[in-house]
Image (spheres, rainbow, N blue to C red):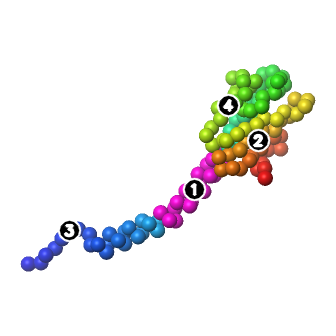
Amino acid sequence: MANTTDGFTLLELLLVMAMVAILVVVLVPNLAGARTKAQDSATMAYLRHCASALEFSRDSLGKLPNPAPTTCEDAALGEYAQVRPDSVKQSQVTVTQNGTAYTLTAISQSGKTMAYDQNGFRELP
């Protein structure tokens, strides 16, 4: 009469645990990079929405709001004011002296500073 068991051997369990550990070591750095890219994308989307809010405000008033907003959350934008997402540490709106052009800057949680103006998006050093 043969003695058989229906379980896993210790060697099989150790091999599975080793494979899982290798997968974790490979995947964790990739997931951290994906989180940074997602935060940067959310910051760019925030700048795009802020630019839209300024343009809507310009369309309804015929010019940029006066006094000029200092952030995208500023009450000077009225109903177009934005809610700052968690991915953005800080934002700033700079309007030119004559009130016709603006530059938006935001600092992402990843530490990157991004800007948007009439020339499009760019990352600041």
Q: Amino acid at mark 3?
A: Asp
Query: Judging from the image, what secondary structure is the residue with disc 4 in?
Result: loop
Give how far across and how far down residue 64 sits, in percent: 82, 27
Specify whether 47 is left or right of 97: left
First reached walking from the N terminus: tag 2 or tag 4: 4
Q: Which mark is residue 43?
A: none
Give how far apart the Cα atoms at labels 3 and 4 are: 61 Å
Specify whether 117 is left or right of 16: right
Residue indicated by mark 1: 32
Residue indicated by mark 4: 82
Q: Amino acid at mark 4?
A: Gln
Q: Residue at x 74, y 46 (%)?
A: 114
Give how far apart the Cα atoms at labels 1 and 3 are: 40 Å
Query: Judging from the image, what secondary structure is the residue with disc 3 in?
Result: loop
Residue indicated by mark 3: 6
Image height of 112 relative to 67, above or below: below
Q: Amino acid at mark 2?
A: Thr
Q: Is residue 37 magenta?
A: yes
User: How crowded is the residue under tag 2: few (<14 C-alpha within 10 Å), some, or many (20+)?
Assistant: many
Image height of 15 relative to 81, above or below: below
Image height of 94 relative to 40, above or below: above
Give how far across and how far down residue 94 sits, in percent: 82, 35
Dots 3 and 4: beta carbons under 8 Å?
Answer: no
Give how far apart the Cα atoms at labels 1 and 2 are: 24 Å
Q: Which mark is residue 105?
A: 2
Image height of 2 relative to 101, above or below: below
First reached walking from the N terminus: tag 1 or tag 2: 1
Q: Which residues are magenta?
A: 24-42
Give how far apart the Cα atoms at labels 2 and 4 are: 14 Å
Give how far apart the Cα atoms at labels 2 and 3 are: 63 Å
